[in-house]
Amino acid sequence: MGKKMKLTRRVFLVGGAAVGGGLLVGYGLMPDGDPLSAASLLKTGDGEVALNAWLKIAPDGTVTVAVPRSEMGQGIYTALPMLVAEELDADWSKVTVEQAPVDPIYANKTLLLNGLPFGPEETGMVPDSTRWAVRKVSEWLGILATGGSSSVRDAWVPMRQAGAAAREMLIGAAAKQWNVDAADCTAENGAVIHKASGRKAGYGELAATAATVERSGMPTLKDPKDYKLIGTSAERLDLPAKVDGTAEFGIDIRLPDMLYATVKASPVFGGTVKGFDAAAVKDMRGVEAVVEIPGAVAVVADSYWRAKQALADLPVEFDDGGNGGVSSESIRQQFLDALDGEDADSYRDDGDFDAAISTASTVVEAEYAAPFLAHATMEPMNCTVLVGDGTCEIWSPSQAPTLVQWTAADILEIESEQVTVHTPLLGGGFGRRAEMDVVAQAVAVAKQMPGRPVKLVWSREEDTQHDAYRPASISRFRAGLDGDGKPVAWWNRIASPSVTESYLGRHWPWAAMGGPDPSNVEGSADMPYSVADVRVEHVLSKTPVPVGYWRSVGHSQNAFHKESFIDEVAHAAGKDPYEYRLGLLGDHPRHAKVLETAAKAAGWRTPLPNGRGRGIALHESFASIVAEVAEVSVGADGAVKVDRVVCAIDCGIAVNPDTIVAQMESGIVYGLTAALFGEISIEDGRVVQENFPDYDMLRMAQMPVIETHIVESDGPIGGVGEPGTPPIAPAVTNAIFAATGNRIRSLPLMNQGLLVS
């Protein structure tokens, strides 16, 4: 049985609002269609037969699985087909994948659950009914989106059901052909077998007849003990094409008679175009047009390079929108003033913090800071658009193809059904490709060039200086300890802008009405450590800098803050930081097991040479629990080298262990890069950094050895794309403290008098 949640005023209000909304739209506004029946959604050819909205079978037995999420390196082109193939009893060597069409049937019903004020194990009337309502709202919205480490979690039931339904239909087809009882037939490795007679027929032979078999209710799913594919490191279906160069990313799109465009927007946030001199570049070779679009100027040419060269020579004058005086220092002071103020939103208030802190034997206080961060995807931001007569076709490497469709329809003033969206592979997403800025610009340019496809490509400089950044934040802590060093009071106040409000303001201003945003405090308000009297608050402090969803969102800052401070508290109590954490996890045995696994694998108690230290961090995000131990060397000259990282994860059922290991490594590299180098700084209302030379990435020679341990668990299935990122920064800074006694309270490390080697 799951953990019962405490009914608080905030949970009641948030949960009640969601339930009310869900009931309102849940009856009468739900989209039509059953994904187990809507076979017509899939395009078929060469004798292929679609058995439902998720899969089709070719005469040679090849099973093609439609994946409705964007593949950006995280492995869902393998993990999701595995769910179908397991229940279908398919031959994995004959399974392939294609991108599903944009249709509400494939809506991501799990993504919105990340914003609820309770975890996956919490049960009761409010959490259970709220989850139901949120899923109904998600169905009504019908949004295909990839993010929040939700792809496998969302697909876990429907894609297994799709495979199981198809299996039953194929068995029914064989039984019909052989005139036998379906109960006497079994499916195995892409074929149906009649046990008594030994007759056998491949799925390719049976598919056409299977399509005529009527289903009787929901199919029966396998018992996990019977899994043959789930839990194995099946070969990734997307890798061969990526190795031989045939994989098609957005940047690879080539169409007949295609034009290329690139843009220049105001370098100051909120600035606008005052004027430009198109005549200065109109006669340059290859230039087709110079057009103004909302907030920017675009040059269109017969190649990207010619468009870029012309744009560099184009005289453009911008208005700064009144934000020319904004700087990193002014924003920092704004946050400090906000923290000193009286107003704050309470996200957790257990017990009586004021009374508990007043009687504490020891009080520990600290303040932590994290900077703005860019996403820095390897594939440049791009979008290709062909505008026709009342129609539009788009090739967009996007995390939210439904929003691409809506954005284009709105700009062109046509129905969404007239917009066809293709989603090629993404060269990195991390939340950046959930933004619609590049899409909106591409459609606006193509609207002025009807009948010809236009590929818009942003330069690296444009992307670095016009991102939707991970928010900067400052987090204050105060903890009270009793005579034994146990924490009896815990206070945390965070100042930052709201990602959700900023995102909604860019895409649906009417929906950006403020209110609670759990991402502000995620990982802090729901920390697993047992403290009787806890108060966690957030002060909303808006800035002109646009902020967006960055890999692991609020967890990325709050894990650094929280896991660094608990280390400080352990030190003040004179306790080992691992043992101290473990002693506070009595109510969370899964967390304790993950922490113990990482510490044991890292050899926590074994001595290290002088100048080398170990740090540990534990964090839950996206329904997965991750602990990381970092071993760091610090030279006499202050040179820091991260030598080794040991990671342990409990993500429930491990669908593909190899993918989990890869994603832990990926998340660690991403978070370590940010911890060592990551900072977007603001001067005169604009971003200082321009490209990788001043927004550095981790080099191969700086890469630590990473070991990943997957903890067996019967817990709820969790995500793996993001949970590896949050613990790495505090694990490293805690290790630096262990090695040197120097406590790092602000990132990145390169700003702390330390050299990165």
Image (cartoon, rainbow, N blue to C red):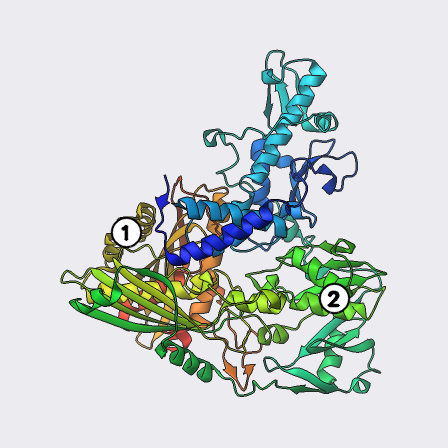
Disc count in the image?
2
Quadrant hosting residue 51: top right
Residue 519: tell me if it is visible: yes
The three-letter code of the residue at mark 1 reads Leu
Position of 205 with respect to 8 (left or right) is right
Q: Is residue 280 above or below residue 241?
A: below
Quadrant hosting residue 533: bottom left
Depth order, front residue of 757/393: 393
Q: Residue at 66% x, 56% y: name it.
A: 401
Kindly identify which numbered label has been placed on residue 720. Answer: none
Q: Residues within 10 Å of mark 2 (few under 14, many from 20)?
A: few
Q: Which residue is mark 2?
A: 411
Q: Position of residue 114 (x, y in %)?
A: 48, 54
Position of 658 with respect to 44 (left or right) is left
Depth order, front residue of 149/730: 149
Q: Which residue is mark 1?
A: 585
